[in-house]
């Protein structure tokens, strides 16, 4: 039993025929004429614009996250800063929350004044 490559080579009617230069050029012209002409790149400015917009969005997101984190650490609003400074002897409690796509929520509560030698009330 022969493999498929050998079988194809044995039955190829044009295996030993040579194309003339004119025939090869005619075939090349036919193939190239079937390809549609490419439109010139009129949107060359789009890629740098998208890159600049992405960078600006990343900077704005980072600034907003930093601002939100600073507000949360003071009690959640700008008005709460006076209360937070007045009640500085109260230990700060922070939370870390996770939510899974299935609906499970995990909440860790961190108490900065936690002493492992004391019992919790």
Image (tube, grey):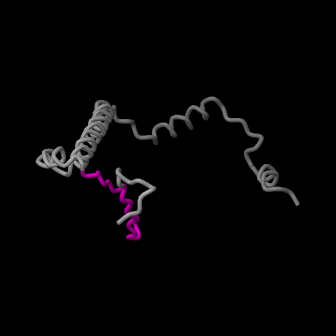
Residue 18 is one of the magenta-drawn residues: no
Left/right of residue 116 with respect to residue 52 in the rendered view: right
Left/right of residue 12 with respect to residue 31 in the rendered view: right
Quadrant for the C terminus in the image: bottom left
Instruction: Say which residue appears at 27% left-offset and 41% top-offset.
Output: 66
Examine the image and state in which quarter residue 49 appears: top left
Magenta residues, start to end = 90-110
Q: Position of residue 25 (x, y in %)?
A: 57, 31
Asked whether residue 94 is in view, the answer is: yes
Examine the image and state in which quarter residue 105 appears: bottom left
Instruction: Say which residue appears at 73% left-offset and 45% top-offset.
Output: 14
Magenta stretch secondary structure, dominant: strand
Q: Position of residue 75 (x, y in %)?
A: 20, 51
Examine the image and state in which quarter residue 43 appears: top left
- Give the camera-side residue of 71 and 92: 92
Outermost residue, right direction? 1
Outermost residue, bottom direction? 103
- Give the camera-side residue of 48 and 7: 48
Q: Is residue 61 above or below residue 10?
A: above
Asked whether residue 42 is in view, the answer is: no
Q: Is residue 23 above or below residue 86?
A: above
Q: Position of residue 86 (x, y in %)?
A: 15, 46
Q: Position of residue 112 (x, y in %)?
A: 35, 50
Q: Is residue 107 above or below residue 57?
A: below
């Amino acid at each position: 039993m022969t493999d498929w490559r050998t079988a194809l080579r044995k039955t190829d009617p044009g295996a030993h025929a040579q194309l003339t230069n004119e025939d090869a050029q005619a075939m090349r012209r036919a193939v190239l004429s079937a390809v549609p002409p490419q439109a010139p790149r009129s949107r060359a400015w789009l890629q740098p614009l998208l890159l600049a917009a992405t960078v600006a969005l990343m900077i704005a997101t980072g600034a907003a996250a930093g601002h939100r984190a600073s507000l949360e650490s003071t009690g959640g609003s700008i008005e709460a800063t006076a209360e937070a400074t007045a009640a500085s002897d109260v230990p700060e409690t922070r939370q870390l929350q996770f939510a899974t796509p299935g609906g499970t929520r995990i909440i860790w509560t961190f108490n900065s004044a936690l002493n492992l030698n004391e019992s919790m009330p």
